[in-house]
Image (tube, helix red, strand yellow):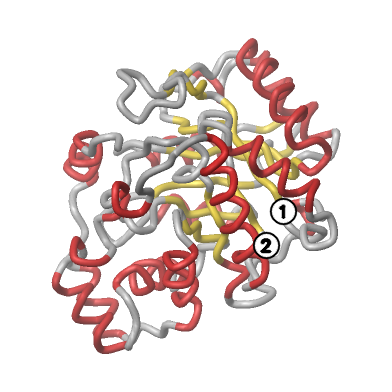
Amino acid sequence: MTFSRFRPGATPVARIGLGLAAVGRPGYITLGRSRDLPGDRSPEALRDRTHRLLDAAVARGVRYVDAARSYGRAEEFLGAWLRARPEAATDVVVGSKWGYTYTAGWRADADTHEVKDHGAATFDRQYAESRELLGDRLDLYQIHSVTPDSPALTDPEVVGRLARLAASGVSVGLSTSGPAQADAIRAALRVTVDGRPLFRTVQSTFNVLETSAGPALAEAHAAGLTVIVKEGMANGRLAGDAAPPALRRIAEETGTGPDAVALAAVLHQPWAGIVLSGAATVEQLDGNLAAAAVTLDESHRAALATLAEPAPAYWRHRATLPWQ
């Protein structure tokens, strides 16, 4: 299946994708990670965990999987799973990203975990690496964490390479980060090649704490892009005991967990195409997938709207989260 044929609304669960940021490397910035990944974090252990998650996700109806060059060995783990389970993976759509290089050397306590570069040489190197690991199963290739000052949207060498990639049948997208996500999204919508929009998808951070990109994401949806939402649980701030009291109260009222309510709040956005789960365990995955069956009434949505933080404050807080 190519990304152009993907229909995220085919079933409720199919609107939830699986992101591999938390299991492709030993360190990440999710709260409670020492609880989720105890003991052995060797490549072999995380490969096995990734494969168990993929098996469970596909069995439950998930059809989109998201990786990146900077997610440690996530592409390697995913590629091995695709080859080992060709029948189960037939209709799984695969997305990955380029623009950050993993530099942690398989250490959770590294000084630098990834280095950003959106130049043409990095694209050439990383696309070759992604193709080697994922082969012709790479359906979507995204620029990783575009900000308004990123050269990737204006560099003719990069844009030309992306246009040729799109012409070859691989969909081209971008992800965004930071307090100016809306500006980056709108800048991307203006990028055209031969009069046609270059990007088919946009992946952005959106959750009940960080809603600033919402209007721009609605514009992207109206322009025909598929919107993929990442960090719907704010790196663990909206899960379990860390969740705000209002979120926990709604979870009790709806008979589910705070994580499901947090993701359901995103799924209720009319422009949201795919909402990523960043689960590190099958139990977390099941809790996240419960979001597809949660209905939030007007009072629930109004209560959740009060949790939104100013974007600069949200991103300053995110920058303080430790890699663990």
> Residue 278 at x, y = what percent?
45, 54
> Residue 275 at x, y = what percent?
50, 60
Which residue is rendered at x = 49% and y = 23% of the image? 102
**Callout 2: 10 Å neighbours few (<14), some, many (20+)?**
many
Asked which secondary structure carries label 2, the reply is: loop
Residue under pointer 1: 93
Instruction: Please state, as top left, top right, bottom left or bottom right, where the C terminus lies in the image.
Output: top left
Q: Is residue 190 visible?
A: no
Query: CA–CA distance between discs 2 and 1?
Result: 6 Å
Which residue is rendered at x = 39% and y = 37% of the image? 177
Asked which secondary structure carries label 1, the reply is: strand
Q: Are marks 2 and 1 in contact (CB under 8 Å)?
A: yes
175 on left or right of 177: right
Residue under pointer 2: 63
> Which residue reaches farthest front?
39
Q: Is residue 59 visible?
A: yes
Which residue is rendered at x = 63% and y = 66% of the image? 62
Which residue is rendered at x = 24% and y = 56% of the image? 237
Instruction: Please state, as top left, top right, bottom left or bottom right, where the N terminus lies in the image.
Output: bottom right
